[in-house]
Image: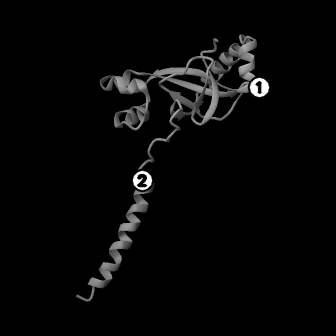
Amino acid sequence: MKHIPVIALLIPLLLSSCNEISSVLVPPGPRQYGTNDYAVGEAQPYPQEVILAKKRLVNFIRRAGPRQRQVLDQNPYVAVQANELVAGDVWPLLRELSSGRVKTMQYVQDLQNQSNYWVKFLLLFDGRTQRLLRSDGVLIMDEPQRGSVADFAGVRAIYAGTGWW
């Protein structure tokens, strides 16, 4: 009977430490993007993806007419497609799609075929310097119209796709 008050004091201490431990052991949920953001995830590019995306960026800028150059002057950041793969190849993304935590129009349309959806991997460049804005690329499932300005993981950029206007 003497130990009951001591045990009663230890229980809250034990429970609070379990919360701290679980926050370290359980991986965080997916990064949340804005409502108008096309990003569904981010990933590190391979060197060959950076090389291909840079070639596509140069092609995109070279082919720009007067109207497109004006858009480039107003929005210097460009999102260029570096790769395309199916959602089943990106298991963290597939896990998020299955749980319903990732928003995309394609996902809503067909729940049975999630792993076969195409995911585009974009790299974000500064069109003035032709350098990467950051080391991570952006995964998208829905794509905006080529040449339009959109949000990609919080960065407002012109969508170049594979480098053609």
**Disc 1 designates what residue?**
128
Residue at left offset 58%, top offset 31%: 152
Residue at left offset 43%, top offset 56%: 23
On the question of residue 126 being in view, the answer is yes
The quarter holding residue 88 reads top left
Q: CA distance from mark 2 to mark 1?
A: 43 Å
Left or right: residue 143 versus residue 6 is right
Q: Is residue 157 above or below residue 25?
A: above
- Between 106 and 138, the residue placed more toward the observer is 106
Residue at left offset 35%, top offset 79%: 9
- Between 16 and 68, the residue placed more toward the observer is 68
Q: State which mark lies toward you, 2 or 1.
A: 1
The quarter holding residue 16 reads bottom left
Label 2, residues with CA under 10 Å away: few <14, some 14-19, many ≥20:
few
Element type at marker 2?
helix
Label 1, residues with CA under 10 Å away: few <14, some 14-19, many ≥20:
few
Name the spot of residue 157 as percent of width and height, x first: 64, 27
Name the spot of residue 116 as percent of width and height, x first: 38, 21
**Which color scheme is applied?**
one colour
Left or right: residue 106 versus residue 78 is left
Left or right: residue 118 versus residue 138 is left
Amino acid carrying label 1: it is Arg
Q: Which mark is residue 84?
A: none
**Disc 2 designates what residue?**
25
Q: How many marks?
A: 2
Q: Is residue 66 above or below residue 48?
A: above
Q: In which quadrant is the N terminus drawn?
A: bottom left
Amino acid carrying label 2: it is Leu
Name the spot of residue 100 as percent of width and height, x first: 36, 36
